Image: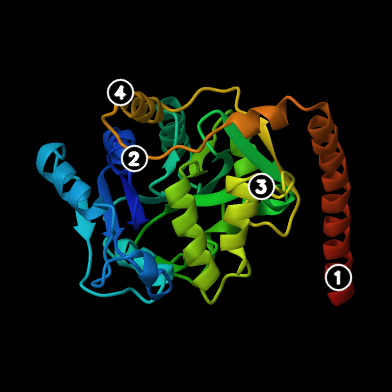
Amino acid sequence: MSPPKITFGIIVLNGEPFTRYCLRSIYPFAHEIIVVEGANRASASIATPDGHSTDGTLRVLKTFKEEEDTEDKLKIITTEGFWSEKDEQSMAYAERVTGDYLWQIDIDEFYHPHDMEGVIRMLEDDHSISTISFKQITFWGGFDYITDGWYLRIGAENCHRLFKWGPGYRYIKHRPPTVVDEKGRDLRSIRWIDGYKMSKMGMYLYHYSLVFPKQVEQKCIYYSQADWSDIKEARLWVENSFKKLKKPYRVHNVYQYPSWIERFRGKHPPQIEALRRDIERGVVDIELRPTEDVERLLNSKRYATGRFALKILGYIYIKLRTLKYLIKRKLKT
């Protein structure tokens, strides 16, 4: 029996320096890779006048296509102008899927190869699986630190990424990523393996979204301008929490919830290690965040105590939140 065909779907604006490393990481597992490059209207201020990346991402994609796409897997979708929103961009790759499964991936998301192999084995062994989510590990201010907090723990760390695909299947929204089958059923209502189950098998999504200052600033400009966003003070968060650590318990960009920094003690996926080597050798020129203040913070007993207290309070908060939801649900029945 042939292995399942995986279509990877990516939307990207200003993806450097991750672009080529992300593509290399998924290429061996891909039936096809469909990349939708460009800006939507809310991100126009960080794009070119005709709606493209300002950091050369489109050029990198075309170079990869010419020089590294030996099996003709990569399809680049772009337009002259602006997309309405990320929903439209995601639908643009979804309507071109020819694989058995759609695996959505952001340009700053990586997996260990052995985990991707494990996922493919799961799909081979159990054809009833309709969707898989992954628990994300979110890197902050560099490759040696991660952020965690209440926002992630109430559900945001559970990223919906892999969906069965077939005739009549549709991608209907980006937040959260949602695919329905030919009967209109949300695939998560059928046979869903969530991120917590995957993490028990040691499989995680490694998310490098808060590593490079320039990317963090651009994301927060977008978040502060998007109609759907409720983090309108995101630019202020960059100055107070990301750059200066004035608020060390609000370090995640969804700053309404308590969050904290910890050391990363695991192993990075191989293509991230390759990126790190290229940065160290000067092959990749990218600004890094200074880490002296992070080290001082992590060496502080007071910070460790505060972090521990927030974890306990967060556990209580999540339990009460769940109880409130169950009571409301019971009252409706």
Residue 178 visible somewhere in the drawing: no
Task: Kindly state the secondary structure of the residue where label 3 is placed.
Answer: loop
- Mark toward the viewer: 1 or 2: 2
Are circles 1 and 2 on residues that touch, CB within 8 Å? no
Mark 1–mark 4 distance (CA, rounded to whole Å): 57 Å
Q: Which mark is residue 22?
A: 2
Nearer-N-terminus badge (3/1): 3
Q: Nearer the viewer, mark 3 or mark 1?
A: 3
How far, Cα to Cα, is label 2 from label 3? 25 Å
**Foreground of the two, 76 or 250:** 250
In the picture of the structure, the residue carrying the numbered disc 4 is 281
Q: In the shown orientation, is residue 310 left or right of residue 209? A: right
Label 4: how many Cα within 10 Å (few below 14, some 14–19, many 20+): few
Residue name at image x 31 percent, y 61 percent: 93
Of 244 and 19, nearer the camera is 244
Point out residue 331 in the picture as x, y percentages from the top left corner.
89, 73
Q: Give the number of the mark in front: 2 or 3.
A: 3
Q: Mark 2: few, some, or many residues within 10 Å (few <14, many ≥20)?
A: many
Q: Identity of the amino acid at label 2?
A: Cys
* Quadrant for the C terminus in the image: bottom right
- Identify residue for label 1: 328
